[in-house]
Amino acid sequence: MALNLYRFYRDAVVQQGTLPVYSSRIAVSAVDNIIMVHQIDAKVVILYDVFMDSYAPISAPLPLLVRGLASNSKQAAQPADQQSSAYGGTLYGEGWNFLIPDLICDAENGLLWKLHLDLEAIAASTSDAPSILEFLQRRKSDLSMVKTLSLAIVRTTILERRPITLVAKAMDIILDSYSRSMKTVGGAAGVRRTSEQNQQSSFQPVEDSRVVSQEPPGTMIGPVINTDSASGVESRQSQSNSGVEHGIANLAAHVDRSSLNTSSDSDGITNTSRAVSQATSSSQISDATGKRPQVVGEDSQPLASGTSMQHGTHVASVAISPIEMVQSVFVLVEDEMMGDPAYLIAVIMEFLRSLSKAGLKAPPDLYVMMTALLACSNRYAEIALFVSNKILEPSRELAMQLIELGRQHSLTRKLGVDMLRERCLHHDYVAALLQDGYYLEALRYARKYKVITVQPSLFLEEAVAKNSTPNLAAVLSFFAELTPSFKTTLDYSRYRHILLEMV
């Protein structure tokens, strides 16, 4: 009752470990570097990731669910047990022949099944967020779903206010994966190129996976429309068992496969997560001669195309960038966490720590959000401390946020104005001085750094408001010298007339 794993080297064979077996009959498949051990008597599958340090299962035992057998939408909406009746066979029946790596030939019913991973169901079957994130970040197929699930898991972890240590570990996994991808390809452009290559490689039948939504027990999941090409099956004929080779070749010649999941009503399996499979029936093939089933895209579409079309545009990589984390996690949870800003502040601090550990730079919007959260808690002293210690990295966005918060706290505004000067943001600094009424200081600064982008009328209005003839004369003279064309403008004529009246 054990399954021994061996690693084959050129000059040696080394035993890697042992997996427990819970059924007198088993079969082994492989999808996207996942070992699928079929416990045939129990009619469930146990999944193992070959890249994990331990040989613990990825999730709870998962049943198979037949998908795509119905030929119309009405039949597709039938419960799983009714669809199994339409299938006419038995899951894990005597006529099932498991073909390495991911095919099942049911010669008795004229069906060829292809196994896929239901990443969404696998993720839902475990509460260990870090381990499932590690699992998802190692997948090479269905990149769009991997990224969507990873972001959703991080969001849920924060919204459920899980322990900070667990959230920190999840952040480390996400950012380590992104950092490795950046180093591997040598930059963002390389990430896109490599991801396109990965997507192309995932079109090969061995690497393909399909995701379907999770439903309560006894309900039928809607079919995932697929556009599998016959060439994927034809390429496997040399690997097929001799007894079924002829049948598979006939199917492959015309195959137009529909996607399907497989499910079991086995007692003791309370989790509704599923491993997904796919099949083609000979009756469907014969019907295809008159009228082909409706599919998405071209017949020549690669195997994984159904998922990319279902979930939107192509996603370049499973790696999640810091900007995506801010936009798809922190921005979305901010409103719901305003009642407890202290927790979200602690999460952002852990995210900043993870960024530093991975050698990555935080987006400026994250510092803006953290400053706003601190201000909501009246923690202005901490804002000053974080700014002075460069925990909050200086930027224009952060400086403008500090100036905005300065309406309630004058020292915070000064931090923002000083940051503008330190960052040599001359235009914004001059505008901030004008807002504070220091127009003479702003003039001196504009002359020193030749700031010609600020409108002269702003200075002239301040001088008129002060009712100071010398100051108004000085401002007119300054802009006349700084910009000779100023004398030809309407502002010059207007304020020169005002000056003459004041004299």
Image (spheres, rainbow, N blue to C red):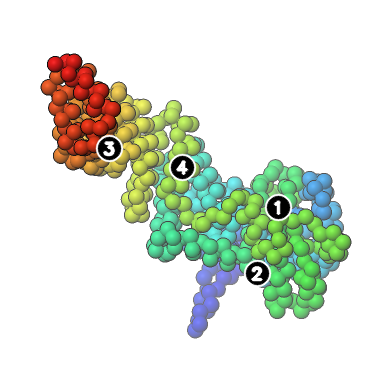
The amino acid beneath tag 1 is: Val
The amino acid beneath tag 2 is: Pro
The amino acid beneath tag 3 is: Thr
Query: Which quadrant would residue 87 be assigned to in this image?
Result: bottom right
3 or 1: tag closer to the N-terminus: 1
Q: Note whether residue 75 is visible.
A: yes
Residue tagged 2 = 101
Whole-angstrom CA distance, mark 3 to mark 1, is 57 Å
Residue tagged 4 = 327
The mark found on residue 224 in the picture is 1
Tags 4 and 3 touching, CB below 8 Å = no
The mark found on residue 99 in the picture is none
4 or 1: tag closer to the N-terminus: 1
The local secondary structure at tag 2 comes to loop
Q: Nearer the viewer, residue 261 or 179?
A: 179
**Up-down: is 428 above or below 310?**
above
Q: Nearer the viewer, residue 314 or 163?
A: 314
Residue tagged 3 = 453
List the single residue furthest toward the front.
488
Left or right relative to 128: residue 468 = left
The percent position of residue 388, horizontal first and vertical second, equals: 22, 38
4 or 3: tag closer to the N-terminus: 4
Residue at the image position 44 percent from the left and 57 percent from the top: 177
The local secondary structure at tag 4 comes to helix
Q: Nearer the viewer, residue 170 or 55?
A: 170
Q: Note whether residue 434 is visible.
A: no
Whole-angstrom CA distance, mark 4 to mark 1, is 29 Å
The percent position of residue 225, horizontal first and vertical second, equals: 72, 54
